[in-house]
């Protein structure tokens, strides 16, 4: 279809037809079944349009008929496809636009793919559900804030560790405390145990990967310091070893966990467990909790 022609006549189309055009744009990268469902839903909203099932036709005759086979427009492989009959000619123009969109994208035969838009919406919904569940951690957040405040008020420090994305979150949290989060204030002592490549590789080489954090706790940790560990599974052996070392040296401990907490749950003085099975959603929740603690600490300590 000629885009200029469409734009010229766009304002003359009904609101329902404009909605169809929007659906065509949004569903361009969908598999054809969701696109069928979207078009059918649009047709049901406007009583001027009717649909009916008719026998499958030869695709070569498509341009000469007001019928659009939403699954066979691009490739003839599904003889049982349902064709839509649009009762008003100008709607056919919009369905031609649909045909153009489908032909412009490569679909794997029979594959159900998801558009970026739908993926975004599902991620937002899942993240929202996970973040809302954090309201159940009110008491734990209060206890965690008290632990950090007491540590910093008495001149002690925070040690923070984690693996992979959790290592990045540990570095992020330490940075917010040493520099600032939202306002100017004095620097707070916080060390990320996942940031020094020399220490990490030496400890891993000489003592094994399980000891990379515990060795640093032994070097830097003092009684009443706080060790903050992040693990989305609760199964990270090096994190567990760091907590054991911290306990032996009389440090306070805090664990940011996910899923069921694994073998790490119940060891720390404070557990912040995010009840989700998605690593991404757990990490997002951990980041929010860390930011909330930054806000609380800045408000309390100035």
Image (cartoon, grey):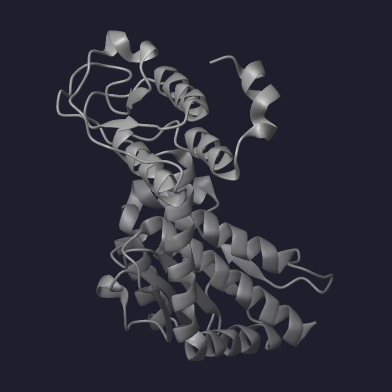
- The answer to whether residue 250 is seen in the rendering is no
Residue lying at the far left in this picture: please name it: 80
Where residue 10 sits, quadrant-wise, is top right
In screen coordinates, is 180 left or right of 289? right
> Where in the figure is residue 260, as x and y percent of width and height?
28, 73
Residue closest to the eye, 141 or 4:
4
From this view, report whether residue 197 is shown above or below residue 168: above
Q: Position of residue 200 (x, y in %)?
A: 45, 50
Looking at the image, which residue is at 36% across and 43% down? 40
On the rendered image, what quadrant is the C terminus found in? bottom right
Q: Quadrant of residue 14?
A: top right
Residue in the image at 32% along x and 32% along y: 84
Q: Is residue 296 left or right of residue 237?
A: right
Which residue is at the far right? 184
Left or right for 31, reference 158? left
Vertical placement of residue 185 versus 38, above or below: below
| Residue placed most toward the observer, 7 or 200 | 7
Q: Does residue 198 show up?
A: yes
Across and down, in percent, residue 155 comes to 69, 83
Q: Nearer the viewer, residue 9 or 209?
A: 9
């Amino acid at each position: 279809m000629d885009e200029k022609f469409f734009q010229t006549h766009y304002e003359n189309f009904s609101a329902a037809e404009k909605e169809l055009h929007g659906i065509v744009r949004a569903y361009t990268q969908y598999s054809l079944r969701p696109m069928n469902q979207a078009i059918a839903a649009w047709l049901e909203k406007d009583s001027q349009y009717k649909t009916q099932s008719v026998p499958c036709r030869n695709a070569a005759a498509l341009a000469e008929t007001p019928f659009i086979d939403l699954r066979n427009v691009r490739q003839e492989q599904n003889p049982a496809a349902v064709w839509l009959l649009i009762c008003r000619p100008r709607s056919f123009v919009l369905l031609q636009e649909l045909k153009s969109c489908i032909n412009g994208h490569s679909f794997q035969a029979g594959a159900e793919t998801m558009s970026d838009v739908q993926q975004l919406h599902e991620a937002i919904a899942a993240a929202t559900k996970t973040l809302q569940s954090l309201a159940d951690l009110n008491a734990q957040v209060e206890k965690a804030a008290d632990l950090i405040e007491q540590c910093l008020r008495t001149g002690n420090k925070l040690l923070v560790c984690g693996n992979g994305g959790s290592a990045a979150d540990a570095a992020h949290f330490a940075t917010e405390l040493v520099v600032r989060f939202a306002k100017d204030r004095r620097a707070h002592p916080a060390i990320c145990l996942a940031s020094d490549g020399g220490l990490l590789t030496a400890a891993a080489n000489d003592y094994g990967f399980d000891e990379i954090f515990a060795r640093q706790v032994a070097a830097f940790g003092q009684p009443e310091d706080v060790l903050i560990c992040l693990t989305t599974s609760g199964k990270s052996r090096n994190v567990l070893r760091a907590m054991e070392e911290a306990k032996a040296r009389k440090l306070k401990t805090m664990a940011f966990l996910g899923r069921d907490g694994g073998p790490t749950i119940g060891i720390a003085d404070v557990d912040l467990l995010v009840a989700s099975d998605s690593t991404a959603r757990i990490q997002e929740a951990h980041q929010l909790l860390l930011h909330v603690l930054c806000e609380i600490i800045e408000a309390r300590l100035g």
